[in-house]
Image (spheres, grey):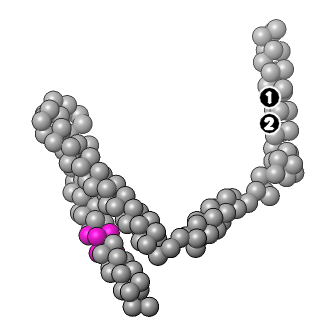
């Protein structure tokens, strides 16, 4: 009987704490409904625009090239991780060692083919954007 009373008291205490938490959240005392999550993003965009406005055209070209090369390197890194993963699966013969996971390994390899095509497409798009952006910046510097 004593154990049942202890459970009832603990349940009542937890129930009361839960009700207090729910009323706090509904009442708006916590400030969750007033939070503006877009504020830091807008501040970052404004500071980045101010940064770009303070640069010369040559510096803007350098920033553009750094961003493009960084994007290309990230894409190539993702592609190499896919290829290394497939190589390791083939080298250690994981499909034959663990037949339970063979279905998942085949699914991963099928997804890797699609992801590889996606990354190759992204790589070509980035190269075309980088090349056209540099050509545009070259002509806008010397012919404006």
Is 106 or 56 nearer to us in this picture? 56
The residue beneath circle 1 is: 14
Which residues are the magenta region?
124-129
Can residue 140 be seen in the rendering of this structure? Answer: yes
Note whether 56 is above or below 73 in the view shown.
Answer: below
Q: Residue at coordinates 76% horizontally, 56% vertically from top-left? A: 35
- Does the magenta run of residues contain 126? yes
Note whether 13 is above or below 139 in the view shown.
Answer: above
Marks 1 and 2 sit apart, C-alpha to C-alpha, by 6 Å
Can residue 107 be seen in the rendering of this structure? Answer: no
Q: Indicate the secondary structure of the residue bearing disc 1.
A: helix
Residue 55 location (% of width, % of height): 53, 70
The residue beneath circle 2 is: 18
Q: Residue at coordinates 70% horizontally, 62% vertically from top-left? A: 39
The part of the image, by quadrant, that contains residue 15 is top right
Note whether 101 is above or below 11 in the view shown.
Answer: below
Q: Residue at coordinates 84% horizontally, 27% vertically from top-left? A: 12
| Quadrant in the picture for the C terminus | bottom left
Residue 1 location (% of width, % of height): 81, 9
- Does the magenta run of residues contain 91? no
Crowd around label 1: few <14 · some 14–19 · many ≥20 (10 Å): few
Crowd around label 2: few <14 · some 14–19 · many ≥20 (10 Å): few
The part of the image, by quadrant, that contains residue 20 is top right
Q: Are marks 1 and 2 in contact (CB under 8 Å)?
A: yes
Residue 110 location (% of width, % of height): 22, 54
């Amino acid at each position: 009987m004593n154990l049942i009373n202890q459970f009832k008291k603990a349940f009542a205490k937890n129930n009361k704490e839960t009700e207090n938490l729910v009323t706090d959240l509904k009442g708006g005392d916590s400030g969750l409904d007033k939070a503006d999550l877009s504020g830091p993003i807008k501040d970052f965009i404004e500071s980045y625009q101010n940064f770009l406005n303070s640069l010369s055209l040559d510096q803007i070209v350098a920033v553009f090239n750094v961003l493009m090369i960084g994007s290309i390197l990230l894409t190539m890194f993702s592609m190499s991780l896919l290829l290394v993963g497939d190589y390791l699966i083939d080298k250690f013969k994981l499909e034959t060692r663990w037949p339970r996971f063979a279905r998942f390994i085949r699914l991963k390899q099928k997804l890797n083919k699609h992801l590889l095509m996606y990354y190759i497409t992204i790589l070509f798009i980035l190269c075309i954007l980088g090349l056209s952006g540099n050509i545009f910046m070259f002509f806008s510097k010397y012919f404006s």
